[in-house]
């Protein structure tokens, strides 16, 4: 008989032995507590390409995984938050294991840079793959807000080409959870930059803000406890983040954004966000909150 039991919802964190993975676990604690679901620390051991791998080598890789899980577990326990912690070690490619976990997860959290990609400007390949393919929201973590007062804003990018309901819902929930102001960002660029003068840019900003104000009016009325304000920028989202990353704790974007995900989870944004502590949360298209 086939087992049709579905795993219970949880917040899943990819652990790989890196400090970034532990930071992701600490960031995810509030997500799990707020949802009243377990926090699952998942370590996937890459299968060996050597069919004749010595048992001692395999045992060593398992010991490495167990040590990484214990370290992350202890870090989460030290927060003294009322979160149930689950652990899981799998013999599977990390991307495969995490994508499978995303089918029932409330959220996936991974560090922006893992052990395999420690150089500046190199986004972990696991994080990039999850952002484009997971079946739940994916948080790519660069830091926490511990000790930062007042909390930096959460920024939600809205795209005039697609519906942004899910992205706004998730962004408002994150701002509320973290006691942070919410800034709703729309960017635009001139079609002919060589002939666009300051007056034309000012007019364009005014039109974009008026449109954004109309889109946000309902959300502001429905969420009086969250400080929601529009932001209009005459530049790309990547340029905006490059100039403001250290003032932002989290950027929430939709996976279906018209420009694709390359400029918010690719190598360019890693250079822009490196050492800023600014994380990225990619909202899965049909996420039901």
Image (cartoon, rainbow, N blue to C red):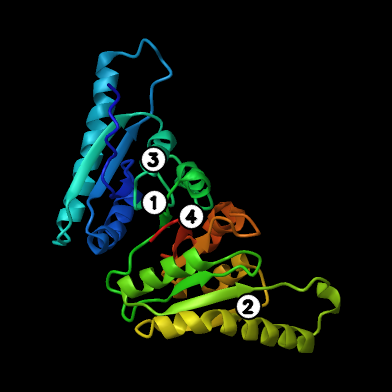
Is 156 left or right of 289, judged from the image as shown?
right
Mark 2 or 4, closer to the camera: 4
Disc 1 secondary structure class: strand
Residue 178: give x, y in percent of width and height: 32, 72
Q: Nearer the viewer, mark 3 or mark 2?
A: 3
Q: Which is more toward the observer, 110 or 33?
A: 33
Residue at disc 4, secondary structure: loop
Name the residue at 43% across, 68% down.
169
The CA distance from mark 2 to mark 4 is 27 Å
- Report the residue marked by disc 4: 286
Q: CA distance from mark 3 to mark 4?
A: 19 Å
Look at the image and tell me in which quarter the C terminus lies. Answer: bottom left
Of residues 248 and 175, which is closer to you in this image?
A: 175
Q: Which mark is residue 98?
A: 3
Residue at which label 1 appears: 111
In the displayed structure, does residue 55 sit left or right of residue 265? Answer: left
């Amino acid at each position: 008989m086939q087992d049709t039991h579905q795993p219970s919802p949880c917040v899943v964190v990819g652990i790989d032995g890196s400090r970034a993975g532990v930071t992701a676990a600490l960031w995810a604690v509030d997500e799990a507590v707020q949802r009243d679901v377990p926090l699952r620390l998942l370590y996937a051991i890459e299968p060996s390409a050597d069919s004749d791998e010595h048992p001692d080598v395999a045992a060593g890789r398992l010991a490495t995984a167990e040590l990484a899980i214990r370290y992350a577990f202890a870090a989460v326990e030290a927060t003294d938050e009322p979160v149930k912690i689950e652990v899981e070690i799998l013999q599977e490619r990390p991307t495969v294991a995490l994508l499978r976990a995303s089918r029932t997860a409330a959220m996936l959290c991974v560090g922006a840079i893992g052990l395999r990609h420690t150089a500046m400007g190199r986004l972990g390949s696991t994080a990039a793959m999850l952002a484009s393919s997971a079946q739940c929201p994916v948080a790519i973590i660069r830091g926490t807000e511990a000790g930062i007062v007042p909390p930096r804003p959460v920024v939600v990018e809205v795209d005039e080409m697609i519906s942004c309901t899910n992205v706004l819902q998730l962004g408002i929930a994150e701002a509320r959870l973290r006691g942070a102001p919410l800034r709703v960002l729309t960017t635009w660029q001139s079609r002919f930059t060589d002939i666009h003068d300051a007056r034309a840019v000012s007019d364009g900003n005014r039109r974009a803000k008026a449109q954004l104000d109309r889109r946000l009016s309902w959300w502001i009325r429905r969420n009086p406890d969250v400080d929601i304000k529009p932001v209009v920028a005459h530049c790309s989202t990547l340029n905006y983040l490059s100039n403001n990353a250290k003032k932002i704790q989290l950027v929430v974007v939709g996976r279906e954004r018209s420009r694709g995900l390359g400029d918010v989870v690719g190598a360019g944004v890693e250079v822009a966000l490196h050492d800023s502590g600014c994380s990225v949360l990619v909202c899965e298209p049909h996420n039901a909150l």
